[in-house]
């Protein structure tokens, strides 16, 4: 069922906001609280196009989500509430890792909460132009938020939704994620090779073709000589294709984390199993059904791949 | 066979094997899945709902993840394939496959 987009229903209010806050980069939304966390280090501003730098969970139950993710990963939350916004910034060890937005599930529709993945870019508008030319759809924006940057939400040619963000404070530095932080993102797609070409045009990725044991395709995306993400053949029923991005949080023990997720009201979608790098990976769903990945990663880098 | 109605005549096409086969195919594959087109249903906008009504179609498919299905990053220098005719540009074969950042936080 197609509904009129919210931007259409509220276009008058948004236009007024835009007129009130017109900035050098176009409309700047003034009504949004400006307490956005700094993503980069203001002392050492750096940019890493193609790097996953943020994620937003859209959930119908913010309290339940905070309880789940706080209990599972040790995240803490800072509320940002206004008349139009029920949002919380999630942090780990004082570093922001993402946001949780409470929204009501559409009545009469079977839709599912999910995490929205943000990738770093230098120029949102240029990236959007390339994306549209290559068959993507623009779902929202571009919009500039004071203290955050400019962003747009897109659906790639297969329909997987993602966002790009030109952070006004730069991008996080390239450190090894500690347990409790995002460590990896995977695109599950019908045609990973074709999607690889699409994302290569957007983020100037280097694309490596990685062999897989079961015949599925696995494309590795890298930038700055670091692996950033992968595209994998969508598993499961080919008649129910649902291309999407899936993010993984580093954990020390995927089995223990999965058990804890269940104890906190979540579900295990994919049991912990050995992955390419030698650690275990699993997929869980939070109490409202939003999937999230768990991934072990040992600090002993350079030991070679799992056989 | 035909039925007469006050406004005209409705022809009822007899069952045909091909139509039956198509119906069976759809049922067996469970292809009556919720649409994945986001159309106008998504407005990812912070003030008007930051980031809006981003809800995925119901029902993720994870049942097909077999033991050999791997999604994670490789370690440095993992094996890679060289296949001609791919739709993307691949780095030269001499280029080792990178891994994720390994630098501990706090070190520059």
Image (spheres, rainbow, N blue to C red):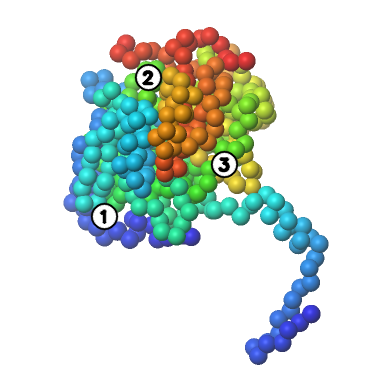
Q: Picture coordinates of residue B1 (x, y %)?
A: 79, 80
Same chain for the residues under marks 1 and 3 in the image: no
Depth check: give the residue in front, B95 or A218.
A218
Q: Which residue is mark 1?
A: A14
Q: Which residue is mark 3?
A: B61
Mark 3 — on which chain does it sit? B
Question: Which numbered disc flags the more N-terminal residue, 1 or 2?
Answer: 1
Depth check: give the residue in front, A45 or A2.
A2
Q: Which mark is residue A261?
A: none
Q: Report the number of discs.
A: 3
Q: Residue at x 57, y 32 (%)?
A: A232
Q: Picture coordinates of residue A263 (x, y %)?
A: 42, 33
Q: Picture coordinates of residue B59 (x, y %)?
A: 53, 46
Horizontal relation, residue A13 to residue B18: left or right: left
Mark 2 — on which chain does it sit? A
Q: Picture coordinates of residue A91 (x, y %)?
A: 29, 29
Disc 3 secondary structure class: loop
Depth check: give the residue in front, B85 or A157.
A157
Mark 1 — on which chain does it sit? A
Q: Residue at x 28, y 23 (%)?
A: A93
Q: Residue at x 68, y 29 (%)?
A: A215
Question: Is residue A126 among the parts visible in the rendering?
Answer: no
Q: Splitting the image into 4 quarters, where does residue A175 fall?
A: top left
Q: CA distance from mark 1 to mark 3?
A: 37 Å
Q: Which residue is mark 2?
A: A178
């Amino acid at each position: 069922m197609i509904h009129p987009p919210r931007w259409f229903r509220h276009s008058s209010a948004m236009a007024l906001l835009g007129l009130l806050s017109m900035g050098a980069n176009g409309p700047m939304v003034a009504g949004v609280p400006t307490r956005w966390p700094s993503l980069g280090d203001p002392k050492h501003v750096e940019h890493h196009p193609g790097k996953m730098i943020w994620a937003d969970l859209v959930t119908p139950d913010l309290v339940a989500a905070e309880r789940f993710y706080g209990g599972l990963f040790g995240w803490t939350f800072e509320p940002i509430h206004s008349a139009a916004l029920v949002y919380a910034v999630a942090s780990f060890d004082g570093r922001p890792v993402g946001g949780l937005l409470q929204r009501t599930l559409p009545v009469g529709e079977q839709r599912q909460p999910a995490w929205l993945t943000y990738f770093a870019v230098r120029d949102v508008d240029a990236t959007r132009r390339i994306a549209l030319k290559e068959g993507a759809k623009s779902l929202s924006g571009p919009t500039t938020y004071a203290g955050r940057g400019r962003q747009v939400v897109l659906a790639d040619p297969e329909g997987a939704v993602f966002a790009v963000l030109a952070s006004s404070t730069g991008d996080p530095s390239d450190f090894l994620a500690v347990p409790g932080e995002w460590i990896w993102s995977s695109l599950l797609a019908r045609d990973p090779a074709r999607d690889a070409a699409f994302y290569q045009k957007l983020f100037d990725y280097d694309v490596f073709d990685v062999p897989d044991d079961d015949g599925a395709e696995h494309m590795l995306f890298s930038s700055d000589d670091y692996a950033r993400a992968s595209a994998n053949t969508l598993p499961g029923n080919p008649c129910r294709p649902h291309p999407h991005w899936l993010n993984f949080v580093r954990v020390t023990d995927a089995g223990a984390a999965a058990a804890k997720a269940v104890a906190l009201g979540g579900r295990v979608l994919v049991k912990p199993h050995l992955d390419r790098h030698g650690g275990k990976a699993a997929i869980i769903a939070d109490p409202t059904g939003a999937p999230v990945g768990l991934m072990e990663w040992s600090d002993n880098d350079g030991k070679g791949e799992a056989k | 066979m035909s039925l007469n109605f006050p406004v005209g005549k409705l022809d009822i096409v007899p069952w045909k094997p091909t139509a039956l086969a198509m119906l069976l195919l759809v049922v067996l594959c469970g292809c009556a899945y919720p649409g994945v087109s986001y159309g106008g249903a998504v407005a990812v906008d912070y003030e008007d709902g930051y980031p809006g009504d981003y809800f995925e179609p119901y029902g993720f498919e994870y049942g097909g993840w077999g033991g050999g299905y791997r999604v994670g990053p490789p370690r440095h220098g993992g094996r890679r394939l060289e296949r001609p005719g791919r739709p993307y540009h691949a780095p030269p074969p001499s280029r080792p496959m990178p891994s994720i950042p390994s630098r501990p936080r706090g070190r520059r």
